[in-house]
Image (cartoon, rainbow, N blue to C red):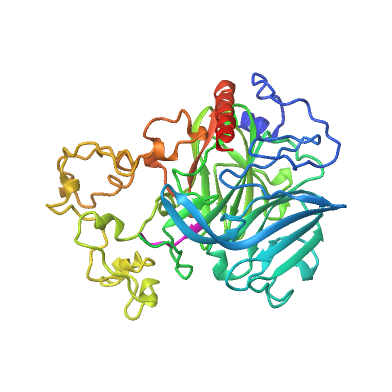
Amino acid sequence: MKNRRDFLRNTFGLGAGLAAVPRLFAAPQESGAGMDMKHMGHATQRSSSGIVSVETPDVSQLPWRMDRNVKEFHLIAEPVKQEIFPGRVVDLWGYNSSAPGPTIQVNQGDRVRIVVDNHLPEATSMHWHGFEIPNEMDGAPGSSQDPIPPGGRFVYEFTLHQEGTYFYHSHMAMQEMMGMIGAFIMHPRESYKPRADKDFAVIMQEYAILPNIKVPNSMNMEFNWLTFNGKAGPATTPLIVRHGDRVRVRLINLGMDHHPIHLHGHSFVVTGTEGGRQPQSTWGPGNTVLVGVAQSRDVEFVANNPGDWMLHCHLPHHMMNQMSSNVGPMTRRNGMPAGLDMERGMGMLRQGSATSEENGPSLGRGMGVGSTFEQRTSNSPFKAESPMQHQDMPDMQHQGMQIGKPEVSKDANSVPGFPQDAFMEGPMMAMDQMVDKPENYGLRPGWSGFMAGMMTFVRVLPPDKYDQIMELRKSRKAISQ
Ligand SMILES: [Cu+2]
């Protein structure tokens, strides 16, 4: 892209800035019914009205059946085992065996019925976030309905006149922090203009789960597992697009933090919020969008820059896995410190000020251990007996990890602050084989050592490489069936 005018032309669809790129879909018919999603799988499909289905990498699509003129869906609220990272299976609560729950896609104007069964050990209630529907269908427990008791069922039914990126979630606050959310896409009657060639949804969640624990601490105020569609990098599945595609990414956030989502190598425009499509007059170029709690943001860009581009939350701690104050020091201190009581674990002060010398370190709170006054919580030089200190440590394999030798200088241990990323990012953490999948095919060897938390790729591929990955995906699916 040469200049801003080109950017506007490409991104706003104001001209043929991409004439050299072959169109891969037939010319659309702008009229026609909404999309038929009965047979939608992972691959993008375009309806007669020019609308493409939304892909939610790592999350399934919820099937539906027609009951006369009503689209009927079935959701089961239940405890789930979710592998958020290779080998890290945690106990979450979600829908239909996944957290986040499966994605629902409907058309503007649809009459929709959603049967919700509660297989949780406690009451729940399903809220349809941002839906303009009758009050008794809103899912607000105690006011618009009685909560659904364990073993109970509630049938929601409404007509949807809106369009945009919505979501469903439990309206019980602690259950939200156990994973209970799913995307709910309302396709417009007529395709948005300009039309997208690829449409993705990414749900952001966060959990506080200490090492060796499987259940999130939903009471915690700080989080050490950050996920895109239920996976932490490098287990996230890249978004695969063709060079020249117009791409829409729908970002949805439900948690305790706001996430500045940043895309490398491209400028995008924000085209929609949790309230639906925004008028073009509001679109301005950017590369980072703050997705606040309970918000969604649609961004669109023309994938005019080939390569594997990171898409990630830009909060540094949200690009890490299993962060807790004891993870770094654990490798070089004796044993693991015990957690503290809840108040101190949450960083609530009992005396003094937060910035005082004795309290300062405990601001790395949340996991409990960071609040232990007696222990150093800053990164500190290795102890003499630490195996990590051996610079000549041979490359080794540990549970499928590649574990290469990090590059550190000879005097590293004498540099205040060392280590920062030396043992948390890079060859030490690479696990390319463990996260092998068609979408990762052809990434630079060792790539996985630098991906964690809310990180994934937008892979802008030439047509032949794109087709190759789609073929791999198909054959992989055939094998697994
Ligand atoms: Cu974040």
Count of numbered circles in the view:
0
- Residue 329 seen in the current view: yes
Rendered view: 364 above or below 341: above
Magenta stretch, residue numbers: 206-211
Q: Position of residue 65 (x, y in %)?
A: 78, 50
- Name the residue: 63% across, 42% down: 55
- Residue 3 seen in the current view: no
Rendered view: 411 above or below 445: below
- Name the residue: 35% across, 80% down: 350
Q: Position of residue 380 (x, y in %)?
A: 21, 55
Q: Residue furthest left?
A: 384
- Name the residue: 81% across, 60% down: 158
Image quarter (top left, top right, bottom left or bottom right) of the C terminus: top right
400 or 328: nearer the viewer: 400
Residue 326 highlighted magenta (yes or no): no
Rendered view: 356 above or below 106: below
Main secondary-structure element of the magenta-colored stretch: loop
Image quarter (top left, top right, bottom left or bottom right) of the N terminus: top right
Picture quadrant of residue 403? top left
Q: Position of residue 54 (x, y in %)?
A: 67, 42
Q: Residue furthest top?
A: 20
Picture quadrant of residue 443? top left
Q: Residue furthest bottom?
A: 351
Q: Position of residue 93 (x, y in %)?
A: 55, 62
Side of 46 relative to 367 (left or right): right
- Name the residue: 47% across, 54% down: 226
